[in-house]
Amino acid sequence: MDMEPPNSTQPMILPPLSLNSGDDFDYTTFLPDDDMSYLTNNEASGSTLVLGDDLGITSASPTSTTLTKGGSSLRQRLERRGHTKSRRGCFNCKRRRIKCQETRPACGHCVKTGLKCEYPAVPQVVHQPQHQVPLFSLQDMRFFQHFLLNCFPHHPLGNEAVWTHEIPCLSQNYEYLMHAILGLAASDLMSRDPSLITFAMMHRLKAIKAIKKTLNEVPKSNNFEEGNALVATCFALTFQSIILDDGMVEFMTFCRGIVIVTLQMGTKGAKFLFTNLQQSDPQNLLKPFIEAVPLIRRDWVDMAVAGVRALEPLCEDEVTVESYGYILKMAEALYTSSFLAYETLCKHYGWWIQIPHERFQRLIDPGSQTCTLLASHWIAIKQIMAPITQVEHKLRAQQPQYKEGSGGGDMGLGMGRWLKHLNRQVDAEHRKYNSWPLWVEEQLDRDIRFFGRTLL
């Protein structure tokens, strides 16, 4: 079975940055509570049995069903245990694999055989300070190893060694970064074990709560190490968002978070662990490779352009008009130049990443059919651009070690799931405007390679 590297259809995340404007940002608006409603909803009681916490996780996507089923199967396994197992027996009984009566000072077996009866010391519960990362479980160790070998982010481009060396070292000092790493790895492993949604969302929730608290103090802090930890956390949460069926809004939100934190670090003269944070450098590196990519099939481009142009009468305010303009230019550029289309795609990212908070809220408004249609066409265009955007992997110095059965590689399919989710949000009245994104979804359902995606 072929495995796909993480998110093979993503352009550079950061637009060109103006480091002079860092102090003008509100460092908490990029994580407003209304954007992440599942973080404070306690309806998903099934998770409490597994997590041993009051953290409730809900989602409009089918993954919430998986979470409930996972909790039910766990309860069933526990209920089937019809016997008790001695866990505090003496060493002699453990060695002989017989049930110990656990009588003190000596058990019956040791008295009968004349052996010295010794019991293990009673384990002590150690309560760690809240600011420390909890001790790893075996499951967490599995997630951590999977991150290092299989699913570390490929952005910023050319930073594989940073992700596999410096960032893991940083994570031991910053709880939110550790949770973000573990959550990303758990999500990537869900392709083989959907029940891991419990752990993926638990770590994600804890990372987001911790980073929101930390961001309130960022303008007062000169800790450059923490700044790099915040940037890495935002990248990890961004990539995890790709795996969520309805994760587009969270993806966009964390992209904005990366820029906000980076701007703040820049104004303080911080030393960045990551290179190629700004868009211009990797674009110049990619240009000769993308220019060599053959043009996308003209009939596909014709359908894309026609679909986007049909949305023009629906765009009546400044935000939707501007978004429409970028998406149309992106589609039209596919007629003449693969690199021009990629460049326009990156400019579109730069636009919505840097618009004021109020305008961004308008762009992601779930109640707006126009914004939903613009998003479905944007994501559909990204699907037909797969041969162009996956060129980014040519700059990777280190490829994830995907192997058959490893469970990785599901992240690249994430935006296809976003498209499904967006298409379902279009109501009957507006469905006539969404025929092309639906067609793209149908082709991907038949063959994920239909538009030229290469599964590595």
Image: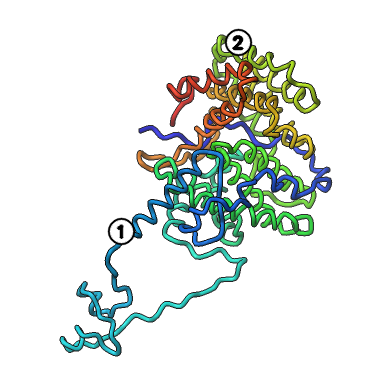
Residue 434, above or below 45: above
Residue 411 percent across, percent down from the top left: 50, 37
Question: Sequence-wise, which precedes: disc 1 or disc 2?
Answer: 1
Residue 376, above or below 117: above
Is there any visible trace of residue 280 in the rendered image? no
Mark 2: amino acid: Asp
Q: Quadrant of residue 364?
A: top right
Residue 163 percent across, percent down from the top left: 55, 48
Residue 318, above or below 120: above
Tell me, for residue 285, which label it has, or none: none
Identity of the residue furthest to the left in this view: 113
Residue of label 2: 302
How far apart are labels 1 and 2 at the CA level? 59 Å
Residue of label 1: 80
Residue 80, above or below 200: below
Identify which residue, 237 or 45, lies in the foreground: 45
Label 2 crowding class (10 Å Cα cut-off): few <14, some 14-19, many 20+? some
Is there any visible trace of residue 315 in the rendered image? yes
Q: How many marks?
A: 2
Residue 172 percent across, percent down from the top left: 56, 61
Q: Secondary structure at mark 2?
A: helix
Label 1 crowding class (10 Å Cα cut-off): few <14, some 14-19, many 20+? few
The quarter of the picture where the N terminus appears is top left
Is 22 positioned to the left or the right of 195 in the image?
A: right
- Please state which of the two labelled residues, at mark 1 or mark 2, is closer to the viewer: 1
Residue located 56% across and 38% down the image: 242
Residue located 27% across and 79% down the image: 91
